[in-house]
Image (cartoon, rainbow, N blue to C red):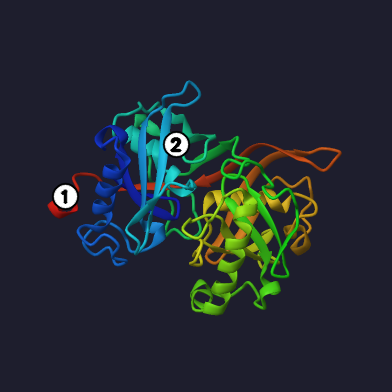
Amino acid sequence: MQFRGGSSKGLYFEARHLPENIIQRDRILLACMEGVGMGDPRQIDGLGGAHSLTSKIAIVSPSKTMEADLDYLFLQVEIGKGKISTAQNCGNILAGVVPFAIESGMIQAQEGFTKASINMLNTGGICEILVQTPHSKVEYSGKARVDGVPGTAAPIICNYLGTEGSTCGSLIPTGNLIDRVDGIELTCIDNGMPVVLLEAKSLGISGYETPEELNLNEGLKERLEDIRLKIGPKMNLGEVKHKTIPKICLISPPRMNGIINTRMFIPHVCHEAIGVLAAISVATASVIPGSINHRVFNTPNSLHELSIEHPTGELTVSLDYQIDEWGKINIHRSGVMRTARLISKGEVFIPPLAL
């Protein structure tokens, strides 16, 4: 099936329909997305949308653990490289997992609302998802709006548990609230997505430029990549040259009613919005005294609904947390509202040359 999940779009598969051999599995999935022309950035011969936000895959199965109902593996097709990465998670595609499981008969919908726990295989942690299911069917229509997505739809509530340090091993992976690379001060954080935060003005820009303007700024992108390559090993990520993490986030004072303004690079292209787990990491950094975010906007430590501004609007993160007397943050739950829509279901034909 093909779903829009949040501000992304991707193909959803049942794990039982795919080969267990990872090399063979990935080759088939690349063929689904790109056809014969594996590595073609246009993806003209497959179902991919020639953009990182529309070249995503979810593999779903009944969970093998007692703590969850479903297992979810996210795969990112690296545009133009003919490669698939499982190094990161995706909260947007996650929003479509429970609707997909219901549509495929993997789980049974309940009357009114259906709640399911998802075991996120890429990085660990559990996400509790609540989907509207009147008459025991998934409701896609509604009044909820997600900035960066046309129209409105039924809300899907996603509450993340245990995502602190899920990729890097700790919430503040370098052990420092402030690090310095090439004379630029920054904060590294991982609450579900490894992110490097730095002030836009420290790079000689305002932070309010459009994604198109930033993507044309080759000098800026070279500096950001240099910073990313140097800080990656210090975040316990090893050599990150060929990895999609960490993400780089440029921050600036809010212009609307949010707590902070962002321009997120994923990692070499400026996002038209912001990813769910990246927004959770940004929001988390914003409530930690001493982080680079606190210099941009001094967030009250009692604030639990945090609006993160991005190029096409905002994304609100609900944080259930406490800061103890020593300044250590304890995160109990991180929540967001997303929407999803089933776009198509059926067969995808794989060219023989791709097998």
Q: How many marks?
A: 2
Quadrant placement of the N terminus: top left
Can you see residue 306?
no
Q: Which of 345 and 167 lies nearest the eye of the viewer?
A: 167
Q: Amino acid at mark 2?
A: Val
Say whether residue 15 is left or right of residue 310. left
Residue 236, numbered label: none
* Distance between mark 2 and mark 1 Cα atoms: 31 Å
Q: Position of residue 351 (x, y in %)?
A: 15, 53
Callout 1: few (<14), some (14-19), or many (20+) C-alpha neighbours within 10 Å? few
Residue 97 sits in quarter? top left
SS for callout 2: strand
Position of residue 284 relative to residue 262, above or below, is above
Q: Is residue 96 above or below residue 15?
A: below
Name the residue tied to disc 1.
Answer: 349
Q: Residue lying at the far top in this picture: please name it.
A: 66
x 49%, y 49%: residue: 144
Q: Is residue 132 left or right of residue 137?
A: right
Residue 82: image x %, image y %? 32, 58
Decide: marks 2, 1 in contact (CB < 8 A)? Answer: no
**What residue is shown at x 18% (from left), y 45% (from top)?**
347
Point 53% across, 58% down: residue: 274
* Residue 92 image position (x, y, % from top left): 46, 49
**Amino acid type of the residue tagged 1 in the rendering:** Phe
Which residue corresponds to mark 2?
Answer: 131
> Between residues 355 and 88, which one lies in front from this camera angle?
355
Vertical order, 279 against 128 (above or below): below
